[in-house]
Image (spheres, rainbow, N blue to C red):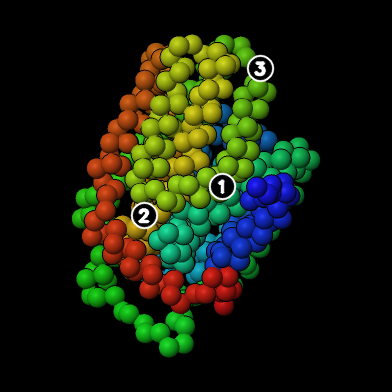
Amino acid sequence: MTRRHPVSGNFSPVRIAQSGARFYRGIPGPIRVLSVGVLINRAGGFVSALLALILAVRGVSAPDIGVALAVSAGFTIAGAWLGGTLTSRLGSRRVIVAAMIGSALVTPALIPASPFPLTVAIVCLIALLNRAYVPAASTMVGSLSTPTQRVQMFSVFQLAFNIGAAGGFALAGYLLTHSLTALLLADAGTSACFAIAALRLPAGAPAPLPGRRVTVPPASDRQTRSKIRHDVRYLVFLAGVALVALAYTQYNGPVPVAFRDHHYNLELLGYLFSANAIAVIVFQLPLSYLTRRLPVRVPLALGGLLIGGAYLPLLAGFTVPLLAVSVALWTAGEIVYAPTAPTVAAQMSNARSHGSYQGALDVARTAGRAFGPSLGVFAYSAGTSVPWWGCGAAGLAATCLFVTAVRPGRSQRAGDESARRLVDGVRPGAEGT
């Protein structure tokens, strides 16, 4: 029996490099352009991520900072809704370009010192514009992916998003301590770069290949563009998304409060969050090879259960080992859940409603993230174990909602068929024009 040389095995560096190259070539060109643009934009998205610190550096009082955060959160939700609505009407490229150009023009208005009401108005407009592009980008990723590709393509998009955010925090820490003007100009510059990159994206539905017929969706598809409120299954799915987002963001609410109450070093909390970011960046895309073979409701329900249930170990005591276990659990949940949720939105919509469905998804997700930390802090003030029980209940409820709402059915098959019509017009690896 011949023995295979180790270098020539299935896991040799050469084979891994070849597989990686084939995977990269299989990514549609517009998704590659979109991912690079998102990475650049997230690397400079300082205003949205560090709003409280920016206002504190400006000498704004704590109560006023709270007001600014609350109002801007409302405009973030409005931006998600507006982005989805406009995407269905104008197309993804126009929404992305307009939102990023608007952000690039408005952000420098924060450089000169302004009265507090004007500052809040500028911040709210930035929040609206910076969120409006997300449903448009998700719509394009879903539309340019085949049904079997979607989980992986959304993983690529999430990878770019996370790498940009991780690099942005490191750069923001330096700029914030040296020059607030440079920080704001960098934010505006990255938005402008994304707008320029987005000009290479397809203007609308991809052009068909020569010799292929173009299938126009029936009138019923046009009528469903704004009828999400009548899609009961999708509304049930959105309720689950909001619950998962609410549970996930407890790391930004009661967890730091409990950390302080137990007199732990806050640097340790930063290390745990950094470990979460690194794990998501490293493992999300490789694991998408496995999750893509499963029915979408399986990783979706598993992700919701892991994210919500991740806080239950803290009921045994708020110790560093148990907190590490908690972070590991909701990191695993995030890895399998994050690319699956927009995949479901693409499957349950049709060619003319992709934008509005992705917008509704982002509204539910943003609302849960906006109100989750404050609700968690209020729950913690009522009892130190209340938020952890609440997260477990939210995760279990979300899992039940996902299993109920997401199942093979006519809406999913319609979404897959509409996506096939769009993808037929784009060769894998072809650049958008």
Q: Residue at x 43, y 75 (%)?
A: 424
| Closer to the camera in the image, 75 or 114 | 75
Q: Residues within 10 Å of mark 3 (few under 14, many from 20)?
A: few
> At label 1, which amino acid type do we have?
Pro
Asked if residue 424 can be seen in this view, the reply is yes
Q: Residue at x 54, y 28 (%)?
A: 328
Q: What is the secondary structure assignment of the residue under circle 3? A: loop
Q: Which residue is mark 3?
A: 265
Q: Which residue is mark 1?
A: 286
Q: Residue furthest right?
A: 178
For marks 3 and 1, give the CA distance. Answer: 33 Å
| Closer to the camera in the image, 315 or 332 | 332
In the visual, does 236 lie left or right of 76?
A: left
| Closer to the camera in the image, 248 or 337 | 337
Q: Residue at x 45, y 26 (%)?
A: 310
Q: Which residue is mark 2?
A: 345
